[in-house]
Structure formats: C-alpha cells, structure tokens
Image: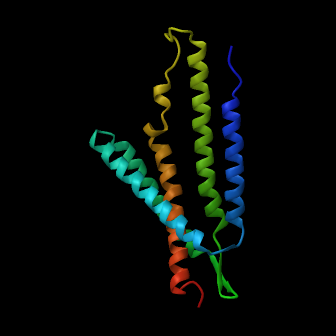
Amino acid sequence: MSNPPTAFVGVAVVLCFVVYRRARRAVSRRKVSRGFTIRAVLVSLITLGLLVALAFDAVSGHYHLLAGGVGGVVVGACLGVAGLRTAVFDREDGDLFVRTNRYISLTVVGLLVVRIAYRLFGAYSTMQTVTTAGPSGSSGGSLNGMSSYNDPWTIAVVGILLAYYAVTYGSIVYLDRTDGAVA
C-alpha cells in the first residue's frame, strides 16, 4: 500500500508559515531599512540568473521555458509598477514607511502558493502511481515528467514573483535615497 505523505505535510506546514509571513508583510506598514536594499540586490541577481540559465537552456531547444520565464518577468515587472503607483509612502521622524498594495502582493503570493500546491499534488499522485505499479513499473507512471524545471507555467510564476519583488524593492530603495516618495 502507500506510505503516508509525511514529506508533503512537512512542506505544506513550512509553506503555510512562509505564506503567513508574506501575507502579514503585504498588509502592514513597514519601515524602509537596509534590508530593502539587500533584498532588491538579491532578488535582482536571482532573476537575472534565472533568465541567463533559461537562455542557455533555449540553445538546446527548450524555447518554451525561456518564453515562460520572460513572460513571467514582464508580467511581474508590470505588477510591480502598478503596485508602486498605489503604494502609500509617509515619513515619520526622518524614516520612510511604506504600505504596498495588498491586493497585488497577495495575488502574487497566491499565484505561487497555488502553483506549488498543484505541483505537490501532481508529484504525490505520480509517486502513488509509481509505487503501486510494482517493481517492473510497466503499468505505472514516471517521475521524469514532474520536474518543475520542465514546466513553463511554474517558471512563469517564479518569474512573476521575482520580477515583482525586484521592481518593488528596487523602486522603494530608489525613492528612499532620492527623497522622491514624499514631497
């Protein structure tokens, strides 16, 4: 018979905690600090690294992955700009505080959560099929098709998330340094 999905439960618990923290940050007022600069640089480098890796992979014929990644980055950048237009900035005692658009932030996080849940469900279903097929595996499925890297939709969602936060954090840091956020 099948084993209990303890690994998936563990991933689900960690995922719920991450979503809770991200959702709490999305709806609360935050002080712009040095952490925003570090996040902006890290997320931008990761986004650039993803696009470079996808470009190299496109050379071997996986153009669909590059299209998903570039499409996700473009959509994420547009969402970042739209979110900044509706963000609320204020200064208090010389410090800049920001409250980003909660609906856009929660939508971006929700996209990632739904995609991860879909991939986990698919992986769990595939593992059940493989384990019930027996040692020969003649009637079972294969885990080869469940690679997240081969899925342009997952790459697109990751691109949306990365580009959204790169644009958001980068713009907030820029506005803080130039005093352009508050007149």
Which x, y percent locates residue 56? 31, 46
Q: Looking at this view, name the residue that lies furthest to the bottom.
A: 183
Which x, y percent locates residue 116? 59, 42
Indicate left or right for 145 with 96 as reference: left
116 to 143, vertically: above or below: below
* Residue at image point 46% right, 27% down: 144
Residue 80 visible within the image: no
Indicate left or right for 55 with 154 as reference: left
Which x, y percent locates residue 122? 58, 31
Name the quadrant of the N terminus: top right
62 to 5, vertically: above or below: below
* Residue at image point 57% right, 9% down: 134
Residue 177 visible within the image: yes
Residue 88 image-quadrant placement: bottom right
> How is this picture coloured?
rainbow
Q: Nearer the viewer, residue 29 or 74?
A: 29
* Residue at image point 72% right, 42% down: 13
Name the quadrant of the C terminus: bottom right
Which x, y percent locates residue 10? 70, 37
Residue 125 image-quadrant placement: top right
* Residue at image point 54% right, 64% down: 39
Q: Looking at this view, name the residue that lies furthest to the left.
A: 59
179 to 78, vertically: above or below: below
